[in-house]
Amino acid sequence: MKKVLFGLFALSTVAMAAETNLYLRAGADLNGEYDVINYEGTKVNKDEADDFSWEIAVEATREIYPKVELGLGLAYQKHGDAKSAFNHEVYGENEWDDTTLEMPGYTSIPLYVVAKYNFDAINNFVPYVKANLGYSFNDEDGDLKVHGTINEPFENDPDYIVTEEWGGKADVKIENGLYYGIGAGFEYNNFTMDLMYQVNQAEAEITLDENEKIKKDYDYSRVTLSFGYKFNF
């Protein structure tokens, strides 16, 4: 909450200045991807995001030079869980273990600087390019879940396979990191639409047991399609 209040205070400081533009945006990710975590030859997750990922943002800018805007932004970004990884291990004849690992996604609240360049209008359409750079406060959305089935032949009948299920979970913590994005769009009668390539950098700390923890990069990258509206003050 303190992070959000600090961000809102910073935005309000910019908004109090003369000739301020306030943008409200909502967007959806088109192709979210995570860093793949590998541990001792085992793939913990796939790179694709499995769930719908979205964001809302508020940005306050001023025109510091003709056609050039600079300001601050604050966003709430909900990243979907990574796709589950399936691992198959053979122990011997007719014996195997099918293991599924489910790595959680995370939520990001980045506070960032916005730089925007507006081109000349074309039939009331104003094309622009923009870039964001800031710091992402990340929070995990759950634990690492593990589910497996051990399959082995019945002692008195090798043709009959016995299946035994097992499961567990491991604590996951997501560390904060850099946030950046770059993209382009257009404005029409104060409505905006843009495509942004964005990255939230993060590290995942997974507690396997009380004596072992692993840390791996767990960045989230995607292209986001956003729609918004600009208020002038």
Image (cartoon, rainbow, N blue to C red):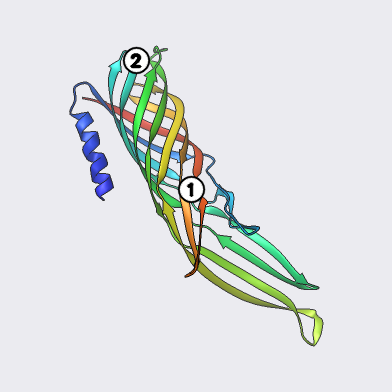
Give the answer, above or below, for where 113 lies relative to 210: above
Tag shown at residue 67: 2
Which element carries disc 2, helix, strand or loop?
Answer: loop
Of the two numbered discs 2 and 1 on the same chain, state the one appearing first in sequence: 1
Give the image location of residue 138, x and y in percent: 39, 49
Give the answer, above or below, for where 89 lies relative to 155: above
Give the amino acid type for the residue marked by disc 2 in the picture: Lys
Residue position marked by numbered label 1 in the rendering: 52
Q: How many marks?
A: 2
Q: In terms of image quadrants, where is residue 66?
A: top left
Residue in view at x 46 percent, y 28 percent: 183
Which element carries disc 1, helix, strand or loop?
Answer: loop
Residue in view at x 52 percent, y 64 percent: 145
User: Which marked residue is nearer to the observer: mark 2 or mark 1?
Assistant: 2
Residue in view at x 24 percent, y 34 percent: 11
Q: Residues within 10 Å of mark 1 (few under 14, many from 20)?
A: some
Residue that lies at the very extreme toward the front in this rendered image: 211
Does the CB distance between marks 2 and 1 fall below 8 Å? no
Give the amino acid type for the residue marked by disc 1 in the picture: Phe
Please state which of residues 10 and 48 is positioned toward the viewer in this rendering: 10
Residue in view at x 24 percent, y 40 percent: 8
